[in-house]
Amino acid sequence: MFDPYKVREDFPILKRKINNHPLIYFDNAATSQKPRQVIDAIKEYYEQHNANVHRAVHTLSLEATELYEEAHGEVAKFIGARSMEEVVFVRGTTEAINLVAYSWGLKSLKQGDEVLVTLMEHHSNIVPWEILSKIKGFKVKYLDVNNDGTINHEAFKEALSPKVKIVCVTHVSNVTGVINDVKLLAKIAHENGALMLVDGAQSIPHIPVKVKDLDCDFLAFSGHKMLGPTGIGVLYGKREILEKMEPFHGGGEMIREVSFNPKTRKCTISWNDLPWKFEAGTPNICGGVGLMAAVKYLKTLGMENVKAHECTLTEYAMKRLKECEKTTVYGPQDSTIKCGIIPFNIEGFNSHDVALLLDSYGIMIRSGFHCAQPLHQKFKLSSSARASFYIYNTKEEIDSFIEALKEIEQSL
């Protein structure tokens, strides 16, 4: 049985007190806390195995290389990729999307083409395409969303045409927590000849995801949102597509051979095998080790259990929030179609003021645009407060959160 109270024992930071209150961490959509198992894996790597990978034949290099390659394999199994060759380590979701934009888009997109994104996207799934469109002359096309932040599937179908070459959609909105049916969207996209890129930053940590089932062409996600360290993330890509793509970064590790011809005074360069073709320079080896530990931890818990626990918390929180007379919750009200993310505002308060006031109770939340300004404009909001849950949160913490909101409401 999944026991959040037992899980909490693995997270040292949860023993802290903030402003003389027990730490309640409700900012998990921004980044998650780290269990002792991940912290220990990082510590052991630096104490016992630290060396560069794929560079030498000495013991430490071989050990580091084995760990780093094993990490690719563990991630591949976790998301159901066919092999580790389909798993590229990057710095995070942002770099993964940029890799697709420049390695695939720079070569494949041209004037007259379209890239379809939704108004609920994180800026990381908007800005790279806008920048590239200025270079290549294609159009970034925006799909509107319903008033509750969900996607209208009929409108999605109508937005597709032979001009659309790739569809870029978040699996789970980082503002509302709504879970998009990306399997259906990918099917529709493929029927219209478009590729499918999925932003999995908010889905991979919280719900079971298998890329074969989704049939997406690309999937991007970050390690730090799923118990791993910062500075490590993943781009999954179908092997047949990755093989045709040019590298994003150039330098060491990503080449097989650089040969100089003294007669022509030119170099001939051949690329390394997948996934190393896209991992130029010394990689974040320790980040990969930490991510592997995080993946193993989540596998031990079981992603179905993770999802069920968050659904329970979300349903409970949505119910209790109705007791708050001056608090408005945005997005879908049905807790069964969303992950543990709840955006809200308190009448008469700026979202940043709400966050600061909750901090005085030891409650950590996010405030602002959450890097998704177009969706806030859709909701006619200048900003919002956001509470987001994870495996170590409890109903008792939600009770404390609700009581704090009531006190804030009464303070005006």
Image (cartoon, rainbow, N blue to C red):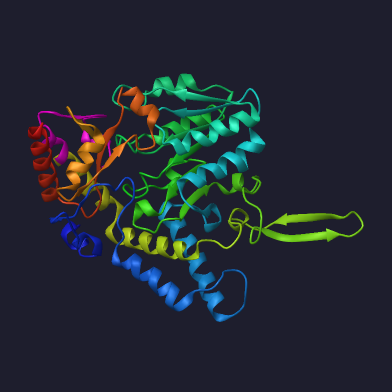
Q: Nearest the camera: 21 or 244?
A: 21
Q: Is residue 25 left or right of residue 207?
A: left
Quadrant where the N terminus lies? bottom left
Which region is colored magenta? 317-342
Residue under the image location 61 percent in, 29 percent down: 134
Question: Can residue 11 be seen here?
Answer: no
Q: Is residue 405 left or right of residue 93?
A: left
Q: Is residue 298 above or below residue 351?
A: below
Q: Is residue 314 above or below residue 50?
A: above
Asked whether 332 falls inside the magenta stretch, the response is: yes
Q: Nearest the camera: 246 or 364?
A: 364
**To which quarter of the image does residue 349 belong?**
top left
Q: Is residue 153 above or below residue 365?
A: above
Q: Position of residue 202 (x, y in %)?
A: 36, 44
Q: Position of residue 23 (x, y in %)?
A: 18, 55
Residue under the image location 30 percent in, 31 percent down: 383
Q: Is residue 345 left or right of residue 29?
A: left
Q: Position of residue 186 (x, y in %)?
A: 46, 34
**To which quarter of the image does residue 411 belong?**
top left
Asked whether 78 falls inside the magenta stretch, the response is: no
- Farthest residue toward the right? 263
Q: Is residue 372 left or right of residue 220?
A: left
Q: Nearest the camera: 269 or 151?
A: 269
